[in-house]
Each structure stands twice: as structure tokens, then as C-alpha cells.
Amino acid sequence: MIKVDFIKNLSKEDRLKYMVIMAEGQLSSENDFIANLSNISAIINVAVDDCNWVGFYIMQDETLVLGPFQGLPACNRIELGKGVCGTAAFKKQVMRIENVHEFKGHIACDNASNSEIVIPIVKDDKVIGVLDMDSPSFSRFSELEEMYLVKLVKKIENYI
């Protein structure tokens, strides 16, 4: 069992650094993709506060399918180009949305969500899935968090 109680006493950046270290530890000790994403969603949930949903969607037959997550039940499938997740996957780019209600075509799986960040997981120019995070706060996700979440996703990509 991983002890993470102390993480709440760290600065925001130190928490994010430790999140990436813990994720790499998970990835280096387990080969199963789903097991890794399950624990990484829990690691992120502990390290990043003020989130109401943290998880992954995995690409299957040109559709994002719900994978491991922390939070309330979510949308099972998201088409490429639809919503923030589908747009991030289609464009292969990070989407950091300060107000999801202003994002045309936003898919509201949880009505409490007001901001969102999505980072595509790409290997050999092929989208494998996305990391998706929602918050009930507007403008919740900063450049600093984006930087560390991208680092975390790069670690995942390295172990695929």
C-alpha cells in the first residue's frame, strides 16, 4: 500500500512533482495498462485538489471508451471531435478549458463540472486515449498543472 497522507503538506509544485514520481513508480513496477491507469487516476486524485473527476478514456475503434477513473459515473463513449475529450483526441493537443459552459459541444457528464483539462496519450502518432480532469471551480487548471500532467502522460506513453 502506498502512503500518501504527507502529500497534503507539500507545496502545489512539490505535490505535482511527487505525483509524476509516483506514477513512474507505478508504471515501472506493473505491465498491465488498465492496472496502471487505475492507480495513476488515484495518484492524480490525491495530488491535485479541487477536482470532481479524474480519469482516462481509451481509444477503441475510433471512439473514446471510459477507462479507469475517480469520481461519479461518467459517459461511456465519446466520439472523436465531440466534447473536450473528443476534440483533444482528434487534434492531438492539450485542451485546458476555463469555463466548459462556453465550449461549444461540451458533454456534461457531471453538471457540477465548470473547468476541464484533457491531455491526449499518443504513441507513434496514434491516439491511445486521453487523461481527463474536471473541476467544479472555474479556471481551475493552471499552466503549472498542465506542465506536470503532460510530463505524467509522457511517462505513460514511454511505458506503452
Image (tube, rainbow, N blue to C red):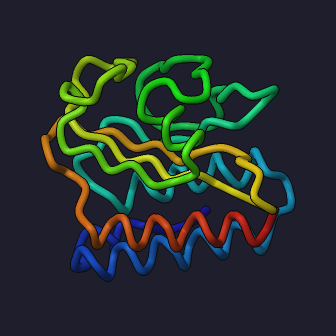
Number of callouts in the render? 0
User: Can you say whether 153 is above or below 112 in the image?
Assistant: below
Residue 10 placement (x, y as % from top left)? 26, 78
Horizontal placement of 84 versus 58: left or right?
Answer: left
The quarter of the image holding the C terminus is bottom right
Query: Image quarter for residue 133?
Result: top left
User: Can you say whether 90 is above or below 74 in the image?
Assistant: below
Q: Residue at x 46, y 70 (%)?
A: 19
Q: Residue at x 19, y 44 (%)?
A: 98
User: Can you say whether 89 is above or below 65 in the image?
Assistant: below
Q: Residue at x 69, y 37 (%)?
A: 58
Horizontal placement of 9 versus 130: left or right?
Answer: left
Residue 144 placement (x, y as % from top left)? 29, 73
Q: Residue furthest left?
A: 138
**Residue 145 or residue 79, whichever sits in front:** 79
Horizontal placement of 52 versus 43: left or right?
Answer: left
User: Can you say whether 21 is above or below 92 in the image?
Assistant: below
Q: Residue at x 75, y 28 (%)?
A: 62
**Residue 3 or residue 153, whichever sits in front:** 153
